Image (spheres, rainbow, N blue to C red):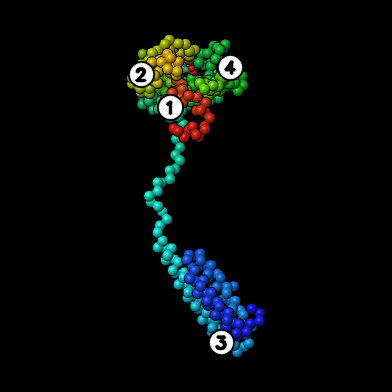
Amino acid sequence: MAQITAQSLHTAIYVLREELAGAVAAVATQADAEAFRITFLSRNGKVASLFEAMKSLPGPDKPVFGKKLNELKHYAEGIFAEAAARVESAAAAAPSQVDLTLPGRTLPAGSLHPVTQTLNEIKSIFVAMGFDIANGPEIEDDYHNFEALNFHPNHPARDMQDTFFVSKDVLLRTHTSPVQIRTMKKQQPPIRTIMPGRVYRNEAISARSYCTFHQVEGLFVDKHVSFSELKGTLVAFAKQFYGNDIKYKFRPSYFPFTEPSLEMDISCFLCKGKGCRICKQSGWLEVLGAGMVHPNVFRNVGIDPEEFTGYAFGMGVDRTALLRHGINDIRLLFENDVRFLRQF
Ligand code: DAH
């Protein structure tokens, strides 16, 4: 508005007033109100630009137009304040956007791994019977894993086919029995301890066997611990864990670190002993090995076998977890695929 005259400024005021009236009617939201303020009332807005234009009018016209422009400005401010108040109270009165009838959003909840759940159950049964819990290292030496457990130096279990060796004397434990040795070296009888943990074997991987799995070892050493006490404990455990109505049987067996040794079978809890694919039609499942601690083992850890006797047992965990959940491939337990793990 370089060539401003009194006439053109008069027209511009009229036009802007019309524009203000139209624009304020269209203000519907708080954002519209802010846009209105910026367009018309800010420092570079349309009202301010007419004040600016007025400066180039001839001197005597200025007071006249100064007054007109002040009126325009008051008008603009007034309608803006009204519009701002209107949209603000409309926003406050607007119905809530929260639909209380919608179902809540479920939080993804984690769950324990099926092996952990099974382990926890086994632990709680033995803890209730008075057993402590001990742990040992997964990387062991030949002494604890074999030698102290009375394995002959040429025992086939030391073979490279079964054992993952780290070096000549260091290996991944092939069973939880070395924790027996560590426990008896640390502690004098009475000892009543279970030792859960992960073990490793260099076996062909298939749906039925994997290079790592879990065992729970048990050890009870005191004066006069008897073989019948061992059997009674195992039966009490099996009934609590597998069900009161299972049948069981003990078979004579051999382990270097126990004498006499036994294995326990229970009637297949899937087919109730009738015979199915899981129990290979036999109706029975092998669940654990056990026996009376061999006197050589006691000597190796400095416990007098004339004074003390003890029993030990060891059971696999993973296969039980598979059977209980109807999982048909052990590899699923170790792949940590969340689509699998989510189901437990
Ligand atoms: N360590 C044996 C295994 O890995 C299981 C076992 C059998 C443990 C008899 C024992 C036992 O403590 O007395 O197959």
Q: Position of residue 71 (x, y in %)?
A: 51, 81
Q: Position of residue 160 (x, y in %)?
A: 59, 17
The amino acid marked with disc number 1 is: His
Look at the numbered disc 1 and give the secondary structure of its residue.
helix
Q: Which residue is mark 2?
A: 246
Look at the numbered disc 4 and give the secondary structure of its residue.
loop
Label of residue 199 in the image: none
In percent of the image, x 37 and y 18: which residue is there?
272
C-alpha distance separating marks 4 and 1: 31 Å
Label 4 beta carbon less than 8 Å to ligand 1: no
C-alpha distance separating marks 3 and 4: 108 Å
Query: Counting residues from the N terminus, which is met first, the one under dot 1 or under dot 3?
Result: 3
> Is label 4 in contact with label 1 (beta carbons under 8 Å)?
no
C-alpha distance separating marks 1 and 3: 94 Å
The amino acid marked with disc number 2 is: Ile
Q: Position of residue 59 (x, y in %)?
A: 62, 88
C-alpha distance separating marks 2 and 4: 36 Å
Q: Nearer the viewer, mark 1 or mark 3?
A: 3
Q: Which residue is mark 1?
A: 325
Residue farthest toward the bottom in the current orientation of the protein: 60
Q: Nearer the viewer, mark 3 or mark 4?
A: 3
